[in-house]
Image (cartoon, rainbow, N blue to C red):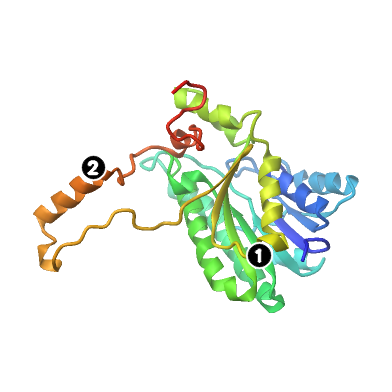
Amino acid sequence: MSVDGKVALVTGGARGIGLAIAQELARAGAKVVVNDTGVSIDGRPEDPELATRAAEEIRSSGGRAIASTRNAATLAGAKALVAEAEAWGPVEILVNDGAILKDRMVFNLDPDSWDAVIANNLSAPFYLTRLLSAGMRERLWGRIVNLISSAGLIGNRGQAGYGSAKGGLTSLSRIAALDLARYGVTVNAIAPFAHTRVTETIPSSTPWLVDYLATVKGVAPAETVARLVRFLCSRRARIYTGQTFGVRGRELFVFSQPRPVGVVSASDAAHVDAEFLERAFDAWEESGVLAPLETDLMLMSRDLSNPGRVRGTDR
């Protein structure tokens, strides 16, 4: 079963990775609802006509698209967006890409900024998944793809709100996949690495930030992420669900699922004492299972096909 003729709702779909996804799905024959509130990266009103222009661009290239500026960060807004989209037909593909940033160190992050990021980046995908998965279950077909971030998997300084929302979206993807698997609905997450307005906010202030930016600027177009989304929406990908993928230019990778990597056992619960804990942590240190504290940008500045080598160096 292809995506031809299916209605696909893409949030954050008017620029960057979201626009590339909307265009790719339209080229595959989907009827795309380009949803974008047109806000700046920190959530301030910026360009209310953004979604309209993106939909027009898709139509001018021969695709089918309509625009929506609804904000799904509230349940009422999500319901209004779903009603708009389903006026065109049942939504069988949902791509949650809309997100904002309000970065502050955790000790400086104000609650209003936290609430806004969680609402836009986590609650909105939940509302849309809850509302649209009912019809997907009835039709025994559906594709949900959530755009997450390595900031939610690994962490990054100053991104308590953004990282928490994206980490929560990763867990939501896995749990929704478990809930919907019997109905033929797949749910997957993608940590995208591409040159967008988000990467433009990253300063090249350290050697590893320079290396990280070199992995995306000019070598990691948003179109590569879009092609992965299209594949995950295809019939061929029907058996893949609950996974977290990444794509960075020519590189495609899959993230490990959370599993214990080091286990030690005492003879009984009474012997889980200070001596046992000392031995356990010594063993974990020696075996290297305790991951170092580093940011996602530090990790992703590396050549993942050769983890010991940093891009742009001879190491």
Describe residue 155's horizontal placement relative to residue 198 as left or right: left
The furthest residue to the bottom: 138
Residue type at tag 2: Glu
What residue is at 64 percent from the left and 40 percent from the top? 40
Q: Position of residue 216 (x, y in %)?
A: 60, 32
Describe residue 186's horizontal placement relative to residue 291 as left or right: right
What residue is at 27 percent from the left and 44 percent from the top? 287
Per the rendering, the mark at residue 300 is none
- Asked if 156 appears above or below 90 in the picture, the reply is above
What residue is at 53 percent from the left and 51 percent from the top? 116
The numbered mark, 1 or 2, whose residue comes first in the sequence reads: 1
Describe residue 131's horizontal placement relative to residue 256 as left or right: right
Describe residue 231's horizontal placement relative to residue 182 as left or right: right
Task: Say which element carries label 2.
Answer: helix
- Asked if 254 appears above or below 217 in the picture, the reply is below
Instruction: Point out the image quarter for the N terminus.
Output: bottom right
Task: Say which element carries label 1.
Answer: loop
Q: Position of residue 210 (x, y in %)?
A: 51, 24
What residue is at 46 percent from the left and 39 percent from the top? 296
Q: Is residue 268 visible?
A: yes
Per the rendering, the mark at residue 238 is 1
Instruction: Point out the image quarter for the C terminus.
Output: top left
Q: Position of residue 106 (x, y in %)?
A: 38, 43
Per the rendering, the mark at residue 286 is 2
Q: Are marks 1 and 2 in contact (CB under 8 Å)?
A: no
Q: Position of residue 214 (x, y in %)?
A: 57, 27
Inter-mark Cα distance, 1 to 2: 41 Å
Quadrant of the rendered structure where residue 125 is?
A: bottom right
Given residues 71 and 289, the one toward you in this image is 289
Residue type at tag 1: Arg
Q: Residues within 10 Å of mark 1 (few under 14, many from 20)?
A: some
